[in-house]
Structures are given as C-alpha cells and as structure tokens.
Image (tube, rainbow, N blue to C red):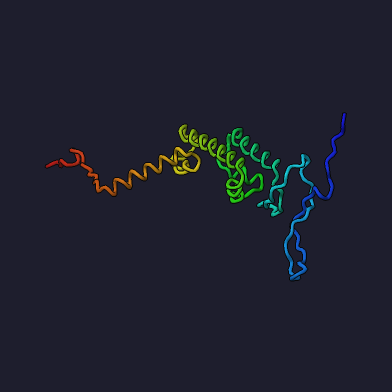
Amino acid sequence: MKKTTHNTSKDNIIKPLRKTPNASTSKSIVTKTPTRDLELNESKWIADYQDCFTFKMKPITEAFINRFTNEMVTWAETNEDALFMGKFLRAKGISRWTLYEWVQKYHDIKQAYDTCLWILGERREHGAIIRKYDSSTIAATMPHYSTEWKQMIEWKSKLAKDAEESGIKFVVIPSIDQLTTKKE
C-alpha cells in the first residue's frame, strides 16, 4: 500500500496580509504572503473572508465552497427549527453581507442559498397553515423566501395601482338593517 504525502513546500502555503516597504516611495504597501497550509486535498485558494466574531481572516477554497454549500443545504433540510438563514450563518461566523457577496460571486453558493430559502419558506408557510407560527408575520416575510409569493404580492400591488389610476370608485352600501331605524 502506497503512503500518501502532502506537499508542504513554501510554494504551497498562504500567509496573511503584511505590510512591506515600497522601495520607490518608502511607503508601506499590503502584500499577500503565505503562512498556512492549503487544505490537505490541495484545493485551489480563491479568496479570504473575515470571521464576524473573531475578526480573523479565513481562506475560501474550492473545498470550502463545496463543504459550505453541502452543510448549508443539509442544515436547512434536517433541522426542523431552521427558519432563518442567520442562525446558520452565526454558527459559521459568517455575516449576512459576506453571504450576499458570495451569492453574487459564486454560482454554487447562489444555488445552495436559493435551495435553502425554498426549504425554509416551505417550512414557514406550512407552520403558518397549521397555526404553529403567526400567519400574518409569515405572510409578510414570505416574498423573501418564495418567488411565487413575491410575484403574487407584485400582482396585487399592480391591480391596486391600476384600479386607483383607472378612477374606479368602490361604494360601500350599508345593509338594510342599518338604514331602518326604530320609531318609538
């Protein structure tokens, strides 16, 4: 059986940012130099992100993206208490702004995020239907979780705007009981 060894040469290491003097201007500039080994599978380094609790920089690699997306979808699918993405993000030390940036940059994270919103939206809607959660609160937030809900809200808004612009007036006619008065 052949033993597997991993390359730990200095060429395969990433170091945090450090200031180095610029010879031409004698000002400090920020450069990237290696300090930590890449993941054991030698996954390609893509970028860094800042942990929102420790404020330390952490690497984003292809393996990190695969692991992160799998964990995110699994969390949404298997955790019956999962109602908000923020709960998962806090556990990972990732701010929601960082996630929104990743959704714009990385296709796999966008797909996983959309899948999670779909799963969480269905859970929230089902909870409102069976009266586990307040239906008015859920209805107000559902357009964030479901494109169908978002389209329905936009359609209702358009109908209301069209009715207002068309000059149609709604007249409320009181019932006959309200019109008759007792004479004594």
| Point 47% across, 32% down: residue | 130
| Point 51% across, 37% down: residue | 121
Quarter placement of the C terminus? top left
| Point 59% across, 33% down: residue | 77
31 lies left or right of 101: right
Depth check, front residue: 3 or 69: 3
Q: What is the x, y in percent for residue 139?
A: 44, 40
- Total number of numbered discs in the rendering: 0
For this orientation, the residue located farthest to the left is 184
Residue 106 in view (yes/no):
yes
Q: What is the x, y in percent for residue 94?
A: 64, 48
Residue 106 falls in image quadrant: top right
For this orientation, the residue located farthest to the front is 24
27 above or below 49? below
Quarter placement of the N terminus? top right
Q: What is the x, y in percent for residue 124?
A: 51, 37
Residue 184 in view (yes/no):
no
Residue 157 falls in image quadrant: top left
